[in-house]
Amino acid sequence: MSENSRRQQIESMLSNEPDDPFLQYALAMELEKEGEHQQSLEWLERLTLSVPPYVPAFFMAGQQLTRLDRLEEARDWLTRGIAQAQEQGNLHAAGEMNEFLAMISD
């Protein structure tokens, strides 16, 4: 399956289930693969504003911003993500983000 058709398939599924966080996350990941970083980050931001916030979106945004050498923004996303993961009791995700944050803060 080509990259474009995978994106089209996700967009089609999203049109039927626009509030599905996993589909929104999948679209953000596809957009990043295509180099559409701003669009990807906008989808990730939307996920962080959902109730409850979608914790993996914080980590993905932090990683993406690190690859774009936007480290201050990446640290902000990760810090917010760690707090949200802890609030939701997702200690595994909080730990992963903490490790990544420490790695990019050295």
Image: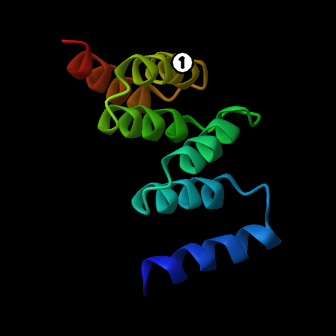
Q: Is residue 31 above or below residue 69?
A: below
Q: How is the image coloured?
A: rainbow
Percent across and percent down for residue 9 are 61, 79
- Residue at 73% from the left image edge and 67% from the top image edge: 14
- Residue at 50% from the left image edge and 55% from the top image edge: 36
Residue under label 1, please give it: 80
Residue sticking out furthest to the bottom: 1
Residue in front for this viewpoint, 10 or 37: 37
Based on the displayed image, in which of its 4 quarters is residue 98 positioned?
top left
- Residue at 44% from the left image edge and 41% from the top image edge: 60
Mark 1, secondary structure of its residue: helix
Quarter in which the C terminus is drawn: top left
Type of the residue with mark 1: Arg
Percent across and percent down for residue 72 are 40, 16
Quarter in which the N terminus is drawn: bottom left
Percent across and percent down for residue 81 are 51, 24
Percent across and percent down for residue 62 are 42, 31
- Residue at 44% from the left image edge and 23% from the top image edge: 78
Q: Is residue 61 above or below residue 95?
A: below
Based on the displayed image, in which of its 4 quarters is residue 94 positioned?
top left
**Dot 1, how many residues are within 10 Å of its Cα: few (below 14), some (14-19), or many (20+)?**
some
